[in-house]
Amino acid sequence: MKRLEKLYEGKAKILYKTEDPTLMIQYFKDDASAFDGVKKGTIVDKGVINNQVSSRIFQYLEENGVKTHFVKHLSDREMLVKKLDIIPVEVVLRNVGAGSLCKRLGVREGTEFEVPILEFFYKNDDLHDPLINDCHAITFGWATKEELQVLRSSGYRVNELMEKFFKERKIRLVDFKLEFGRHEGEILLGDEISPDGCRLWHWDTGEKMDKDRFRFSMGSVEEKYQEVYNLVCSDLG
Ligand code: ADP
Ligand code: UDP
């Protein structure tokens, strides 16, 4: 499948049309941004790693009954996906306190949650992706009540599966963000699942192996992304 014209260029990826109007190619860039685009930079080979890690995780989720947009890992930086009408509600799952939750609620980083916390955010850069609830999403037409139910149950299921997947690879899944979209009457999991959108701590050392290293200029960003790749994709041969 070949790339046709560019449909959209975002901060981390480019979407291209293909000959099939129901399919698109996601091209993974090395560009990194944080704090609503205030901090910008490059993480060498991030695109290659995020494409590979996302492909592996989408495959695993599909094998376990989760419907995703993933069709095929096409090349180093290209993934063939089903074209979605993205629902502008980001679904965040948290197993351990970190990031905006700690700031908002005064929770200590590293606090373990007995039951995972699910949050919805409105996907809108101009408004800095504010925290919302069901009433907002329904009233303002971002998603229906039924769609939110799917997002919620799918979010919890993906968390359960991913926690297990990462634990088997010595990684603590702290939190992550999911995006869903509509495709031919179904809701599919879209976008990417990678160290850009997940907080991943080494199980033994607690070391951060995700975009927080870039956000907070902690160094060894490339090395830690590579380590995640090695742990996640070690069974690919
Ligand atoms: P951003 O738009 O936040 O800068 P990216 O650079 O990652 O983020 O751009 C990828 C864009 O593609 C995101 O806005 C995401 O919602 C969207 N997207 C992801 N998967 C699909 C899909 N299968 N169909 C249509 N859009 C998608
Ligand atoms: N996240 C993301 N994109 C966003 C917002 C959050 O990928 O636009 C991810 C983030 O990497 C983390 C989780 O979602 O794994 C929870 O993020 P949080 O709300 O703590 O916000 P942050 O600290 O990233 O501002």
Image (tube, rainbow, N blue to C red):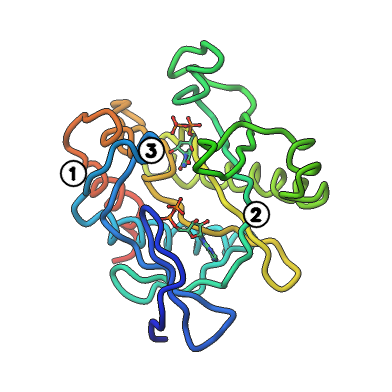
| Separation of marks 2 and 1 at Cα, in angstroms | 34 Å
Q: Position of residue 10 (x, y in %)?
A: 41, 57
Q: Is label 2 or label 3 in front? A: 2
Q: Is residue 193 above or below residue 187?
A: above
Q: Amino acid at mark 1?
A: Glu
Label 2 vs 3, first from the N-terminus = 2
Q: Is the C terminus in the top left, top right, bottom left or bottom right quadrant?
A: bottom left
Secondary structure beneath label 1: helix
Q: Nearer the viewer, residue 137 or 173?
A: 137
Q: Is label 3 or label 1 in front? A: 1
Secondary structure beneath label 2: loop
Q: Nearer the viewer, residue 110 or 22?
A: 22
- Residue at point 80% right, 50% down? 144
Q: Nearer the viewer, residue 189 or 137?
A: 137
Instruction: State the mark number for residue 89.
Output: none
Q: Residues within 10 Å of mark 1 (few under 14, many from 20)?
A: few
Q: Residues within 10 Å of mark 3 (few under 14, many from 20)?
A: many
Q: Is residue 6 left or right of residue 118?
A: left
- Residue at point 51% right, 74% down? 71
- Residue at point 43% right, 74% down? 16
Instruction: State the mark number for residue 171.
Output: 3
Q: Position of residue 188 (x, y in %)?
A: 64, 62
Q: Amino acid at mark 2?
A: Ile
Q: Residues within 10 Å of mark 2 (few under 14, many from 20)?
A: many
Instruction: State the mark number for residue 87.
Output: 2
The residue identified by callout 1 is: 223
- Disc 2 vs disc 1: Cβ atoms closer than 8 Å? no
Q: Position of residue 211 (x, y in %)?
A: 33, 39
Q: Is residue 78 left or right of residue 165?
A: left
